[in-house]
Image (cartoon, rainbow, N blue to C red):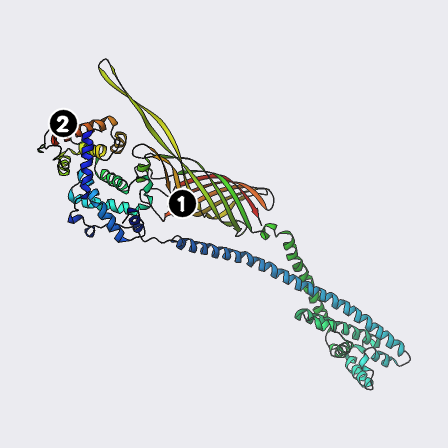
């Protein structure tokens, strides 16, 4: 069923439509949680919060402004960042630019999602968050700076370090 | 973004199709759904409110009309009293007429019986039209027998004539009292010669009554009449001079327009501000209003109306233009250039302001009113320009209507152009009373607003 119809159904309080929309996007939201270092147990709570918030705010979603997926992603990221303390994003000071975390280098063709997820999971949280926001979720360094209360220069530095860290641990040949 | 970032993005997006772990299945989740939408749910709040207002209006109206009833009762009383006075006047006239008739009769009788004896002339003084029969002498004899102890010894026959005459008048007076008390007009208006004769016949019995007692009764009658007069005039005076013209025109309508300034509470880090990318600030908007009002009494009135509000918001954007990098004495310097862009966005609402106002100051030409009220409103649209996540300028428009209620405080200074029209300056503050359709953390539909405008009021 088309997303628009499901949205209309949810707005009328139809739980079946809610179920279908949830099943269509649950994995996507879960992957976001994983990328942002959310534990499996916490991820369940976060997903409940994110979908509850999305379902009760559906009337503000404008399909002309973008896909539902990206609207949902924005809610999820905002929720995760709200829950993450500023301290947890800044407490690591170890320079990890070239520290290997034991991921076996693979050729570009053999590299899969799980490898990336493993790397992101092992990446220090502050880099992982900034790297996710910038590289995967498309936020600008200015937006990230505003969200995380960081200077734009610091954001760019974190992105570079995270990228180098990921490259070093995935496959040098890809770069 | 380089090749590595593209590769990561591609792979991550493919991850969506993998199976959802069992603990994340819908059945194991507790996700809030929006409540079933009641299409006209707001009517459940509005209708009782309007009923309450209508009831309050009728209640106050009945108080006002209650005082009017009193006035009308006074008027009725006044009319009754006037009627009584008129009756008294007519009675007096009748009595005078009757008196003159009696005298005429007496004179006639006297002249006709001048040749007869003094006793027969005296008896003929009480003779009536109906007593021209054979038993006249019997009646007269009886009369003489009755009257003698009272008058004959003191005044003689002539005196008997006078007393009898007085008794006839007094009997009429007594009749007048009874008429005044019972307000039975027919008794006085239908004084036929037959009744008159009966009255005269009865005067025999009245002859036994002490005249002083009758005089006391007369005095009471006079007192009663003199007491009635000022009461009858009082309400007339009040109705004429005190009842103001405004009481007759209790309803009025008002047309208003002005400017407003709004403040939204939560505009930071909310979904809407994220999607719109910018913090917003207030700017001057405008409103147009049409209202109907009704005086509850001299100091209170209530108003209900329809208002169109256009709230103006400005979204500010610090837009990146370019970045220049230069190397000066082996130091790499980067200079970023920005420009400031402002977008005007408009939030339109239609509201039903309902208020209760009290006059705190009132002079011949100036009135100051303080009012409180509620303002249920419907957000009809929210539109404008903004930027998307890629910093592109986009148009946005939220057309989903949402309902909420504001409470309001209002101060109005009016200059009375005439008795029926006035021109005023109004300042009004509105704040959220109850959010009935909350969009959680997305948009605040209960902005605080301050309005400043002009209003023209006309009574009808």
Q: Position of residue B392 (x, y in %)?
A: 33, 32
- Which chain contains the residue that carries disc 2? A
| B137 lies left or right of B297 | right
| A78 lies left or right of B434 | left
Q: Kindly identify the residue that appears in the image at 86 percent across and 77 percent down.
A: B109
Q: Quadrant of residue B276?
A: top left
Given residues B429 and A107, the one toward you in this image is: A107
Badge 2 crowding class, 10 Å Cα cut-off, few under 14, some 14 to 19, many 20 or more, is some
Q: Position of residue B249 (x, y in %)?
A: 58, 51
Q: Secondary structure at mark 2?
A: loop
Which numbered disc covers residue A99? none
Q: Kindly identify the residue that appears in the image at 45 percent across and 44 percent down.
A: B409
Separation of residues labelled 1 and 2 (CA atoms): 53 Å
Q: Kindly identify the residue that appears in the image at 45 percent across and 54 percent down.
A: B50
Given residues B413 and A175, the one toward you in this image is: A175
Q: Are marks 1 and 2 on the same chain?
A: no
The reply to whether callout 1 and callout 2 are in contact (CB within 8 Å) is: no
Q: Secondary structure at mark 1?
A: strand
Which numbered disc covers residue A97? 2
Q: Which quarter of the image is occupied by the C terminus of chain A?
A: top left
For the question of whether residue B174 can be seen, the reply is no
- Which chain contains the residue that carries disc 1? B
Q: Position of residue B420 (x, y in %)?
A: 59, 46
- Please say if B450 is above or below A145: below
Judged from this view, the residue extending furthest toward the right is B115
Q: Kindly identify the residue that appears in the image at 25 percent across and 27 percent down.
A: A152
What is the number of callouts on the image?
Answer: 2
Q: Which residue is mark 1?
A: B379
């Amino acid at each position: 069923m088309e997303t628009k119809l499901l949205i209309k159904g949810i707005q009328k309080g139809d739980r079946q439509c809610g179920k279908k929309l949830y099943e269509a996007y649950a994995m996507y939201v879960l992957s976001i949680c994983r990328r942002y270092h959310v534990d499996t147990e916490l991820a369940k709570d976060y997903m409940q919060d994110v979908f509850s918030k999305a379902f009760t705010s559906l009337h503000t979603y404008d399909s002309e402004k973008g896909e539902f997926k990206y609207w949902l992603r924005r809610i999820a990221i905002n929720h995760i960042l709200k829950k993450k303390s500023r301290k947890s994003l800044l407490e690591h000071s170890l320079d990890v630019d070239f520290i290997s975390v034991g991921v076996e280098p693979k050729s570009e063709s053999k590299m899969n999602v799980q490898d990336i997820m493993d790397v992101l999971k092992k990446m220090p949280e502050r880099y992982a968050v900034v790297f996710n926001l910038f590289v995967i979720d498309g936020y600008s360094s200015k937006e990230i700076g505003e969200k995380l209360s960081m200077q734009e220069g610091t954001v760019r530095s974190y992105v570079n370090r995270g990228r180098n860290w990921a490259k070093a641990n995935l496959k040098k040949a890809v770069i | 973004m380089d090749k590595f970032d593209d590769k990561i993005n591609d792979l991550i997006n493919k991850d969506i199709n993998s199976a959802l772990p069992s603990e994340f299945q819908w059945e194991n989740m507790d996700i809030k759904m929006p409540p079933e939408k009641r299409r006209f749910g707001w009517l459940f709040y509005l209708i009782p409110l309007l009923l309450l207002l209508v009831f309050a209006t009728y209640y106050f109206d009945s108080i006002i009309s209650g005082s009017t009833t009193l006035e009308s009762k006074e008027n009725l009383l006044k009319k009754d009293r006037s009627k009584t006075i008129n009756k008294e006047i007519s009675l007096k006239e009748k009595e005078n007429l009757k008196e003159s008739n009696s005298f005429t009769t007496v004179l006639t009788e006297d002249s006709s019986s001048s040749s007869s004896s003094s006793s027969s002339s005296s008896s003929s003084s009480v003779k009536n039209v109906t007593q021209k029969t054979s038993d006249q002498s019997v009646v007269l004899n009886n009369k003489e027998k009755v009257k003698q102890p009272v008058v004959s010894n003191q005044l003689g026959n002539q005196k008997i004539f006078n007393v009898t005459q007085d008794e006839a008048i007094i009997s009429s007076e007594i009749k007048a009292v009874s008429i005044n008390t019972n307000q039975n007009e027919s008794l006085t208006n239908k004084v036929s010669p037959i009744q008159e004769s009966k009255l005269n016949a009865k005067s025999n019995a009245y002859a036994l009554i002490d005249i002083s007692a009758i005089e006391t009764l007369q005095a009471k009658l006079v007192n009663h009449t003199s007491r009635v007069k000022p009461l009858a005039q009082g309400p007339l005076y009040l109705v004429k001079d005190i009842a103001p013209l405004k009481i007759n025109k209790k309803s009025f309508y008002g047309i208003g327009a002005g400017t407003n300034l709004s403040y939204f509470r939560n505009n930071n880090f909310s979904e809407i501000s994220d999607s719109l990318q910018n913090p917003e600030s207030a700017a001057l908007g405008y409103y147009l209003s049409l209202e109907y009002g009704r005086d509850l009494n001299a100091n209170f009135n209530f108003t209900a109306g329809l208002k169109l509000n256009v709230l103006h918001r400005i979204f500010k954007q610090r837009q990146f233009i370019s970045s220049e990098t230069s190397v000066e004495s082996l130091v790499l310097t980067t200079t970023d250039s920005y420009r400031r862009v402002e977008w005007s966005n408009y939030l339109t609402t239609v509201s039903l302001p309902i208020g209760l106002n009290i006059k705190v100051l009132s002079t011949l030409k100036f009135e100051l009113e303080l009012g409180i009220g509620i303002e249920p409103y419907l957000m009809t649209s929210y539109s404008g320009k903004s930027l998307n996540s890629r910093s592109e300028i986009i148009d946005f428009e939220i057309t989903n209507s949402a309902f909420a209620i504001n409470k309001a405080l209002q101060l109005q200074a009016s200059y009375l152009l005439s008795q029926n029209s006035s021109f005023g300056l109004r300042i009004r503050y509105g704040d959220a009373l109850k959010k009935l359709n909350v969009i959680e953390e997305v948009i605040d539909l209960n902005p605080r607003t301050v309005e400043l405008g002009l209003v023209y009021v006309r009574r009808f």
